[in-house]
């Protein structure tokens, strides 16, 4: 079957009334999440995970991914109107989007960002459709050593890119792997680190850790600002960009889309880094770099396209290899696991309806977002007036009931509280929670593949460097570390000298 | 303050946390069967991870003592943290003993501790709405087996 048949099959699945409804729900919720600062997609997806277990696998994935890319789509609105990222990766849009709004061109900025998001989304869906089958085919020949190397690469890349300090984030990833060993050892049946708690014999509940580390820690960080009011003028005029705007932005959109699609596939980079890279690129090749920061439309069009393309291609490693490229994708993988779908390259052949339905839904979702974002913009901006003090109790309550409902276990809620405290303290110590959650999800898979590799090679550690694919993957991991630690090294020596 | 030697305080403390957890995991893992590199027992892999975590923690502590820049720990909202998490603990303790509605109310009251005196009616309204919403969604729609009140 060619790509056209695959996609039309996907559309036939995604167009069922129920899936359309979940897609719309995801896109709408994503827009809300994207617009309200202090409400990040990771938090909301962690909060909704327990609820999605009760609905069909495809529908739940459609909704969760709608929240994810919808938030990336809409985060720019807050950045433009308030000079505050509505969602972490839209921080780049503040640089030029907000100056445009101050110049009275908020409408043009909003429209440009919506169009570039939509264009980038459409291209990224095609990239996923073309690229995933190739990658999955290649991955079918992977054996234990290759999987081990892939997981190591994903963990290293996410750690390196999620914070300034390499050692602390690697430590968080190792701690996550260690948490992944809690429970019954599959090979020997021995109980590890359960400390007599029966509930821990099946391992640490991943939803509890995600809710604690992301949702609770985030609420604690924001609580001191809960009474703040934001002054927003809800008036946006002149949504249609001028001809000059169009002319200035179509090339940045193309470049941003290409850059974002490429960087999104690599583990760890994701939307935030892609939009920074696109901004830097546009500024460098611009004929008038001095206008950047003063309201240059290129500085909105390029990064916004990169942001959205990367948000979608970010799905590729998770869907084809079963190795998530970031924290949100780790949550998606968790959703798949609990739905009883074993992630990996076989998803494409064993669950084609799931894969192609999800891909098609992404295109439908992008279409919905365009409609949701442009004509309804006035309603969304009014959302910014909801104070956080009314919002966070709702998140708190849904998180608690959600964690409880996964296994009807009050122990899990206590566990989430513990991880909330730990996550908040570690945040204050400049330690990111993403590598830990990724480590927890990948831990059991890593251990299994490591043990199998060494069993097959009779304890010979060189098995990881004598097999070509595994060697390349490990070299990539080393390359990522070296290329990102060199500038840090330089900076450290400079500051001392 | 004390500890004049330590320049990077955040790194020092995080390193200490990692080193302690790593060491504890390494020692705990000794109870399990070790096995060999070829035929790993239950303890081999966690022991390696624990040792790695300990080593990284020690390296962080060492680096924090020698680091160039002085970095202090920023504001830690300890009171917010204690009240919020007490609310979660209260929820966990109440949900199976009394029921969902009480557990939700306790959680909201703890979570809004800093406004309960200033805006009591607002907090009560939030309690009522969220209790009704969770009972409706989780008990009637999703059917989790707990008492309503």
Image: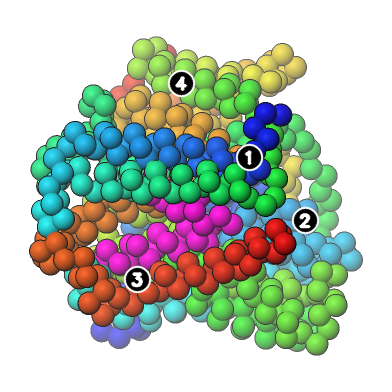
Please name the residue that numbered disc 1 is placed on. Answer: B6
Chain under callout 4: B
Foreground pick, A374 / A85: A85
Q: Residue B2: x and y, percent?
A: 67, 28
Secondary structure category for the residue under label 1? loop
* Mark carried by residue A474: 3
Residue A174 shown in magenta: yes
Give the main secondary structure, helix, strand or loop, of the magenta stretch.
helix
| Labels 1 and 4 in the same subunit | yes
In the image, residue A18 sits, relative to residue B51, either above or below, namely below
The answer to whether residue A327 shows anywhere in this view is no
Disc 2 marks which residue? A83
Who's the residue at 22% across and 77% down the image? Answer: A467
Q: Are marks 1 and 2 in contact (CB under 8 Å)?
A: no
Q: Which residue is mark 4?
A: B89
Mark 4–mark 3 distance (CA, rounded to whole Å):
43 Å
Which portion, as a residue range, is magenta?
A: A147-175
């Amino acid at each position: 079957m060619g790509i056209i048949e695959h996609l039309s099959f996907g559309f036939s699945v995604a167009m069922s009334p129920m899936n359309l409804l979940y897609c719309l729900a995801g896109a709408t919720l994503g827009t809300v999440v994207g617009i309200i600062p202090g409400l990040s997609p990771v938090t909301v997806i962690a909060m909704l995970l327990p609820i999605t277990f009760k609905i069909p696998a495809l529908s739940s994935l459609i909704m969760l991914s709608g929240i994810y890319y919808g938030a990336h789509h809409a985060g720019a609105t807050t950045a433009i109107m308030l000079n505050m990222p509505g969602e972490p990766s839209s921080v780049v849009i503040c640089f030029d989007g907000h100056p445009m709004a101050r110049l009275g061109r908020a409408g043009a900025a909003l429209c440009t960002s919506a169009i570039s998001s939509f264009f980038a989304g459409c291209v990224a869906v095609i990239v996923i459709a073309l690229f995933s089958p190739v990658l999955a085919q290649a991955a079918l020949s992977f054996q234990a050593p290759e999987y081990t190397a892939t997981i190591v690469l994903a963990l290293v890349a996410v750690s390196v890119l999620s914070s300034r300090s390499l050692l602390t984030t690697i430590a968080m990833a190792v701690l996550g792997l260690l948490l992944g060993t809690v429970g019954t050892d599959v090979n020997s049946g021995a109980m590890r680190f359960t400390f007599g708690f029966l509930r821990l014999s099946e391992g640490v509940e991943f939803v509890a850790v995600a809710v604690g580390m992301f949702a609770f820690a985030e609420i604690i960080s924001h609580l001191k600002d809960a009474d703040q009011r934001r002054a927003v003028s809800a008036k946006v005029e002149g949504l249609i960009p001028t001809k000059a705007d169009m002319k200035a932005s179509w090339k940045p959109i193309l470049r941003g889309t290409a850059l974002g699609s490429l960087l999104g596939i690599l583990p760890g980079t994701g939307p935030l880094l892609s939009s920074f890279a696109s901004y830097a690129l546009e500024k460098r090749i611009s004929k008038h770099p001095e206008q950047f920061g003063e309201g240059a439309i290129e500085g909105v069009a390029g990064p916004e396209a990169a942001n959205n393309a990367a948000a979608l291609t970010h799905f590729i490693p998770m869907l084809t290899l079963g190795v998530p490229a970031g924290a949100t994708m780790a949550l998606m993988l968790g959703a798949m696991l609990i739905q009883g779908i074993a992630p990996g390259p076989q998803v494409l052949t064993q669950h084609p309806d799931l894969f192609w339905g999800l891909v098609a839904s992404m295109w439908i979702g992008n279409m919905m977002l365009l409609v949701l974002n442009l004509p309804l913009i006035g309603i969304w901006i009014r959302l910014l007036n909801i104070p956080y003090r009314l919002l966070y109790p709702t998140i708190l309550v849904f998180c608690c009931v959600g964690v409880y409902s996964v296994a009807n276990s009050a122990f899990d809620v206590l566990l989430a509280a513990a991880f909330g405290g730990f996550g908040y303290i570690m945040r204050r110590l400049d330690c990111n929670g993403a590598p830990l959650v990724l480590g927890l999800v990948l831990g059991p898979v890593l251990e299994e593949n490591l043990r199998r590799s060494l069993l097959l090679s009779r304890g010979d550690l060189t098995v990881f460097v004598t097999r070509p694919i595994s060697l390349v993957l490990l070299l990539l991991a080393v390359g990522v570390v070296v290329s990102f630690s060199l500038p840090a090294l330089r900076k450290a020596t400079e500051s001392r000298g | 303050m004390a500890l004049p030697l330590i320049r990077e305080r955040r790194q020092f403390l995080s390193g200490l946390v990692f080193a302690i957890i790593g060491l504890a995991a390494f020692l705990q893992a000794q109870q399990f069967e070790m096995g060999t590199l070829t035929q790993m027992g239950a303890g081999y892999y966690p022991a390696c991870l624990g040792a790695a975590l300990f080593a990284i923690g020690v390296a962080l502590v060492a680096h924090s003592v020698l680091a160039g820049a002085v970095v202090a720990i920023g504001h830690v909202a300890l009171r917010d943290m204690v009240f919020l998490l007490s609310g979660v603990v209260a929820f966990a303790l109440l949900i199976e003993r009394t029921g969902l509605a009480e557990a939700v109310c306790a959680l909201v009251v703890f979570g809004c501790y800093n406004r309960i005196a200033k805006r009591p009616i607002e907090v009560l309204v939030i309690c009522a709405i969220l209790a009704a919403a969770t009972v409706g969604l989780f008990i009637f729609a999703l059917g989790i087996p707990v008492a309503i009140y």
